[in-house]
Amino acid sequence: MSVSGILLATAIVGGTGLILGLFLGFFGKKFQVEVDEKAEAVREVLPGNNCGGCGYAGCNALAEAIAKGEAPIDGCPVGGAAVAAKVGKIMGQEAGEAKHMVAFVKCAGTCDKTTTEYDYYGTRDCETMPFIPGGGPKTCKDGCLGYGSCVRACMFDAIHVVDGKAVVDREKCKACGKCVAVCPKHLIELVPYEAMHLVQCSSKAKGKQVMQACEVGCIACKKCEKTCPSKAVTVENNVAHIDYDKCTNCGACAEACPRKIIL
């Protein structure tokens, strides 16, 4: 190949590279995605579990929402107060005092305390029970089924089925709400970590029916309600409820309960 041929080939390759570079540079600027520096900074301090407990698709979505002012700075239940403080610093806001919440299973119906109507040998999944005769084999239709849908939903190994009933490990729980959402009986709720008295029942059946189904279910006798000095306990739909904002943890309700279902 002659020298002129080599120079020509070099010029063509170089020119093509230059044109492509200019083309990419132009369209790179034209279609450049604006990066919100605050959103990036917030994302860096979030735990990265992408559990969805905040109500958003994941940590990236929550970070963007916080940066836009669409979500609170303490919107991450997994990170808690520590992460809220870091996010508040980035956003120039006071984090305030976040309550430490944990999941709680409102049922004390272990295998030795409850009765069953038949032996069940099918799929071991709570979410399939609405399609099973009677909603499952347990006589109590409001109690924990014990088939572990909540266990499989938890990303933190904080809930397990023990003796036929789901039990939460309070120290591992991050209050992400996954177990709350998946429970078909709506037995799991988020409660303050400091709460010392909790009602372990959700049965809406009348007293006689409860006693036939479970040795420890609430019979709506209202002794807890009448005994509570701060009016924090009320009996609604045949089951006791505690208002944790009013509760002083005096223990009067637990002492009065004849079924001993208040922790």
Image: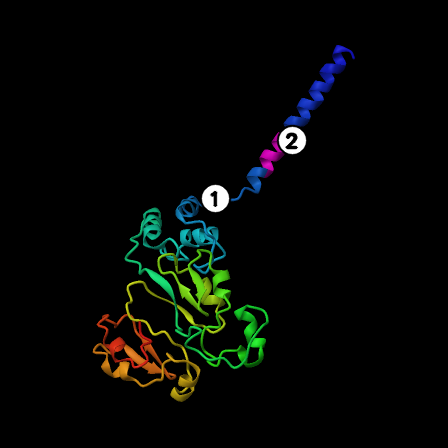
- The magenta region covers 19-27
Residue 131 lies, with reference to residue 1, above or below; the image says: below
The amino acid type of the residue labelled 2 equals Leu
Q: Residue at x 37, y 84 (%)?
A: 238
Q: Determine whether, in the image, residue 15 is placed left or right of residue 198.
A: right
Q: Residue furthest toward the right? A: 1
The local secondary structure at tag 1 comes to loop
Which residue is labeled 1 in the image? 35
Image quadrant where residue 235 sits: bottom left
181 w.r.t. 42: above or below: below
Q: Position of residue 34 (x, y in %)?
A: 49, 44
- Real-space CA distance between mark 1 and mark 2, rounded to the nearest whole angstrom: 25 Å
Q: What element does badge 2 sit on?
A: helix
Q: State the scheme by which the image is colored.
A: rainbow
- Residue 4: horizontal and vertical position, in percent? 75, 12
Measuring 25% from the left and 80% from the top, which residue is drawn there? 256
Question: Which quarter of the rendering shows the N terminus?
Answer: top right
* Residue 188, image quadrant: bottom left
**Residue 141 — which label?**
none
Judge by depth and name the residue closer to the eye, 53 or 11: 53
Q: Amino acid at mark 1?
A: Val
Query: Which residue is denoted by mark 2 in the rendering?
Result: 20
Predominant SS along the magenta part: helix
Asked if residue 66 is positioned above or below residue 223 in the image, the reply reads above
Residue located at (39% from left, 55% from top):
78
Q: How many marks?
A: 2
The quadrant of the rendering that contains the C terminus is: bottom left
Mark 1 against mark 2, which lies toward the viewer? 1
